[in-house]
Image (cartoon, rainbow, N blue to C red):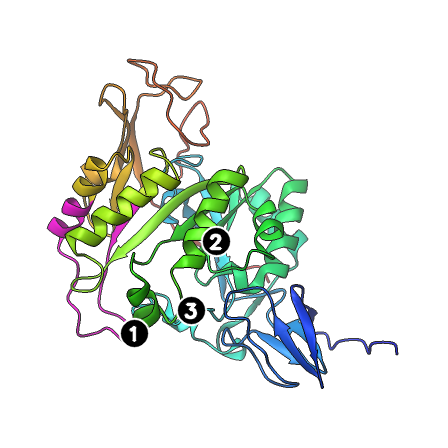
Amino acid sequence: MTEQPLPDDLHPGRWWHPLGEGQVQCDLCPRLCRPRPGQRGLCYVRMNHAGRMVLTTYGRSSGFCVDPIEKKPLNHFLPGTSVLSFGTAGCNLGCRFCQNWDISKARTHDRLADQASPAAIAARAKELGCRSVAFTYNDPVIFAEYALDVAAACREVDVRTVAVTAGYITPQARPEFYAGMDAANVDLKGFTPEFYRKVCLGELQPVLDTLVYLRRETTVWLELTTLVIPGHNDATDELSRQADWIVEHLGPDVPLHFSAFHPDFQMLDVPRTPPATLRRARDLARAAGLRHVYTGNVHDPDGGSTYCHGCGARLIERDWYELGEWRLDAEGRCAGCRTPLAGVLDPHPGRWGRRRLPVSMS
């Protein structure tokens, strides 16, 4: 029997299979949601439409903005350049501390005002002088079909793509999704299964599996971020075990960002992260052997700058998102001792600075 054409606001989904009697299973993320006709998965944006999995947010965004690449945060991927950032709606995790909850918990009709085709996004990024496009604000895994089509259009015009993601994706979907990405910042939200289950409504192991896959089986440039939440994931033992795991399984050159929490969403009773806690986390990670550890969401020029692991010289000075001193040669090595700096680096720094430029695609 011939399938009926989909309405214009629905896009065919990938990574699913039928279960019988109209029910389907989504194979995109580890939740493996099984919606019946008319029902949606937990992410809300993937729906069973007449026995077919569809994406309800294709071509629609919650907004576009040009940011510094360091805001993603990525400190070793084209430093100082601008990135065209956008997201859609929904999320496949349920983090009680979500800092973008108005987007991640939004229904599609609440927030999706700006429409843009993949080709239009790529062309706009090129026109604005952006070296990359970032899928961010909510997790691009749940709008993977749209993200991958944008990525393909970007590569046609020599614009790179960045996934800002929780890494909550199945082994089946991982290869195709990350084949479209040039860089990824993955949120490693904590380092205990209990934290993921109780605070994020998810599981830790699939995220660890994604990190190992990215590091060992792809050329995607990888950086990690942990939002440090007082009383929840800031214990010295947990932070030390996390750093040890990263060194052992991902290697010492993967940058790790420790970001400060501020009360939001369902954790309004938790205090802000003290700067001293971020400095302690950074010291623990460096003591474990990680070479590039950063602090974020606080004013800390030392914790935001990049240093040579060979001689200790400051290679890239950062004050918030503003770059200062640059001590790298044309091959991306320390200008003093010639130790290479890991990353995707241009011979010269970008000059975008701290600017934030909202962009209309209409």
Q: Amino acid at mark 1?
A: Phe
| Cα distance between the residues tagged 1 and 3 | 14 Å
Residue 36 can be seen, yes or no: yes
Cβ atoms at labels 1 and 3 below 8 Å apart: no
Q: Is residue 263 magenta?
A: yes
Dividing the picture into quadrants, the one containing residue 272 is bottom left
Pinpoint residue 291: horizontal percent, then vertical percent: 28, 32
Q: Amino acid at mark 2?
A: Ser
Question: Range of the magenta residues?
Answer: 257-281
Nearer-N-terminus badge (2/1): 2
Crowding at dot 3, Cα within 10 Å, few <14 / some 14-19 / many 20+, comes out as many
| Cα distance between the residues tagged 2 and 1 | 23 Å
If the image is split into quadrants, where does the C terminus sit? bottom right
Dividing the picture into quadrants, the one containing residue 285 is top left
Q: Which residue is mark 3?
A: 93
Along the viewing direction, whichever of 354 and 173 lies nearer the viewer: 173
Residue 85 image label:
2
The residue positioned 26% from the left and 70% from the top of the image is: 264
Along the viewing direction, whichever of 114 and 136 lies nearer the viewer: 136
Q: Which residue is mark 1?
A: 265
Q: Amino acid at mark 3?
A: Leu
